[in-house]
Amino acid sequence: MTSKTVAQLLSQDGTLQDVTLKGWVRTFRNDRFIALNDGSTINNIQCVVNSENFNEALLKRVTTGAAVHVTGELVESQGKGQSVEIVVKTLEILGDSDPETYPIQPKKHSFEFLRENAHLRTRTNTFSAVMRLRSSLSFAVHKYFNENGFNYMHTPIVTGSDAEGAGEMFKVTTLDAKNPPLNDDGSVNYKEDFFGKETNLTVSGQLEAETYAMSLGKVYTFGPTFRAENSNTTRHLAEFWMIEPEVAFMDLAGNMDLAEDFMKSVLSYVLEKNSEDLEFLENRLLQEEKSKPQAERSDMSLIEKIKFVVDNNFKRVSYTEAIDILRNCKPNKKKKFKYIIEEWGADLQSEHERFLVEKHFKCPVILFDYPANIKAFYMRLNEPDSEGRETVRAMDILFPGIGEMVGGSQREERLDVLKEKMKALDISEEELWWYLDLRKYGTAVHSGFGLGFERLVMFSTGMGNIRDVIPYPRTPQNAEF
């Protein structure tokens, strides 16, 4: 008898066969019915115990959280709620779980409580569903790029450059914090540090990915990135995962096509592969929404929201056109927006992005050609518009319920223009000499985008807090586990 998973047993045809199964007890009621789960599916399998056949001391050890090994006969279920069950012949306790101290008892727990027990929270339905979805999305990302001829590239975690020019970086050093070596002027002498210079944890793999795109053609990174941003919000983490494709000879229009096709592909994959988890998470959301005032409830259920992205063509709108729409819309005129849009050049907030997607266009939206001064130095400068305003070939993809999901651009391939932009922002040419080399030796149009993986997981699971879609969240004042 080979051991099977709960998912295999519940999906196979045929009963009246002997099976063996290992898993964790979710509940044990009436000294008769064990609900067993092994993580392979959101569903438990019912194991029916005839208490007369088993020692009372053994049955007392069948508690929530205990690991057990059962063998028995798979039969059609007599009760409601499941198609098959196991009539238990042998029962072995592999690992006890003390009911007095085990924190994940079969009752409702707050997400805050479960974060404090993050090492056990995947023993609950919600978190096992979320993390299976995270795993599927991760696989779908690699599958998409692999099938479309991309090379997977591992960009460095420790870096000397600040790709975003944001400056919020974690330092990497082996120097003695209490007694570092000093220069004559009293500043820290980083020449004596491990790497002989100041280094940090990476905020993005984009610049390094560009170097490989300019020889391998199509590359992508998918790895951890770090921001030392003191933001205690439901949308920020200090450590998160980023997906960043870069493609040579591709302009902004091609970049938009790629991003739209990519998003539809990965979301279609989980609709097909994780239907039971999605249904469970959708029902959880519906229950949660009942306690909210009508105005705050979502217009779409979770699965509808995902299908909304998969089934609709993304509307492409210039930033200038979007500003006109927002400036003249009712919520702006009636001062319902928290941030009132008054003039061209404003940085759009989540409320504006969601209005465009959910109320105005009623489909996912790609905004492009943003004002140059609110975007990064590496984005390609357009010719000034009729009013002399400078824009860059940037694009953001906006989703319902969440706002910005993807940010990307055509990269500045002209050496002189790039140098000018770096000078204006005080970005060191010495530090990025290798990046400038790409514009000296065989430069060409190239583009890419970045997508925070946790934001994609939030969208796909309906979870409202980013701390609940990564196994062990790293946030200000918190590096537990």
Image (spheres, helix red, strand yellow):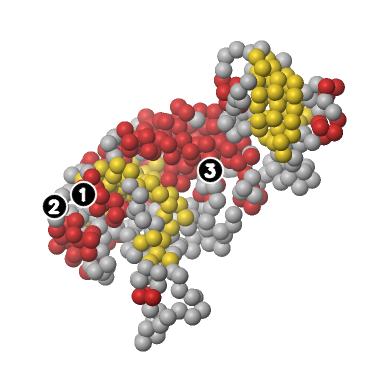
Q: What amino acid is at disc 3?
A: Met
Residue at the bottom extreme? 184
The residue sitting at 64% across, 49% down in the picture is 117
Q: Which residue is mark 3?
A: 463
Image quadrant containing the N terminus? top right
Q: In which quadrant of the rendered view does residue 376 lie?
A: bottom left
| Residue 333 visible at all | no
Q: CA distance from mark 2 to mark 1?
A: 8 Å
Q: Is residue 330 left or right of residue 18?
A: left
Disc 2, SS: loop
- From the top left corner, tell me how far across and down residue 241 is, in percent: 43, 49
| Residue 217 visible at all | yes
Q: What amino acid is at disc 2?
A: Gly
- From the top left corner, tell me how far across and down residue 122 is, in percent: 60, 41
Q: Earlier in the sequence, mark 3 or mark 1?
A: 1
Eye-nearest disc, 3 or 1: 1
- From the top left corner, tell me how far across and down residue 275 is, in percent: 51, 28
Q: In which quadrant of the rendered view does residue 294 lie?
A: top right
Mark 2 packing: few (<14 Cα in 10 Å), some, or many (20+)? few
Q: Which residue is mark 1?
A: 214
Q: What amino acid is at disc 1?
A: Met
Disc 3, SS: loop
Q: Which residue is mark 2?
A: 442
